Image: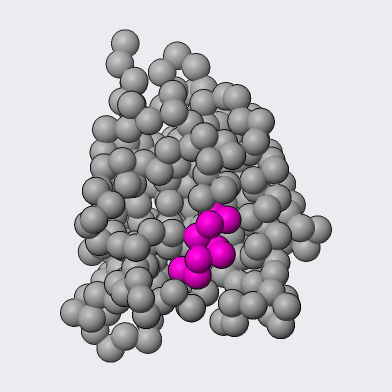
Amino acid sequence: MPDTLTIATWNINSVRLRLPIVERFLTEFAPDVLCLQETKCPDANFPLNALRKLGYEHIAIHGQKGYHGVATISRRPFVAQEKREFCGKGDSRHVATDIAFNGSSVRLHNFYVPAGGDEPDPEVNDKFAHKLAFLDEMTEWFADTAQPTVIVGDLNIAPYEHDVWSHKKLLKVVSHTPLECEKLETVRKAGGFVDLMRQHVPMEEKLYTWWSYRARDWSAADKGRRLDHVWSTPDLAPLSSKINVLRDARGWEKPSDHAPVLATFEG
């Protein structure tokens, strides 16, 4: 019997502050799974009841007070859960869940990669050095990827020329420097992952998921970056039937600066 799985990813920039738009998104779009990043919420304070009332009874959280944090909420039961700490920092930046799909299960990794600060020099900027080390650790970990896997999240890098509003102007801006882009590609290739967003949207087309709060009219300026990603192992790539960046959500009341991305798989 055919199976359809819809996974959404969204850097929410505080799940408690923006709970009303999370509820709106779940009500209007009803993905099977929603992966949130930058939840900024310790596990004990996560709004479990509000989300369970909407039918999302299965929730895996890895949070901390005021910073970072990831959560995967699902209509489908988790077969397994795991969370990993990177770089020995104690940050909450990853959670993985196994979810039944197409007669088997998919391992779903939810990531919030460090932003890296402002100065793209690891010698003078510890935050940038941390980001590079985080990517190196991801590369090492995913070198042995065997099971069907999806990686989603705010990876905080726009790797390709048309993932940013101006390739030339952002080459020295953290999130699009050649070093970061190269390291993210190394992570992707280590696991043999397919960039599903670019599978559906040609490389020569602009594709953004983030627009700065600083712009007076973010939509008119349209100075975006694609910081949020959906990757899969090659066995799942042919089952990826649709990718949608919900740009309108960037204009909802009290929005995140990221838009949610929805990915549909059809078995």
Residue found at the far left of this picture: 220
Across and down, in percent, residue 164 comes to 34, 68
Residue found at the far top of this picture: 1
Q: Quadrant of the N terminus?
A: top left
Across and down, in percent, residue 49 comes to 52, 50
Q: Is residue 183 magenta?
A: yes
Q: Quadrant of the C terminus?
A: top left
126 is higher (above) or lower (below) than 194: below
52 is higher (above) or lower (below) than 5: below
Residue drawn where x is 33% and y is 46% of the image: 197
Residue drawn where x is 31% and y is 41% of the image: 199
Q: Name the foreground residue: 8 vs 133.
A: 133
Residue drawn where x is 30% and y is 62% of the image: 162
Kindly indicate the quadrant of the structure image that contains residue 130: bottom right
Residue drawn where x is 44% and y is 74% of the image: 171
170 is higher (above) or lower (below) than 80: below
Q: Name the foreground residue: 66 vs 102.
A: 102
> Which portion, as a residue range, is magenta?
176-184
For the image, the number of numbered tags is 0
Q: Main secondary structure of the magenta part?
A: helix
Across and down, in percent, residue 108 comes to 53, 37
169 is higher (above) or lower (below) than 58: below
Q: Is residue 18 magenta?
A: no
Q: Name the foreground residue: 262 vs 195.
A: 195
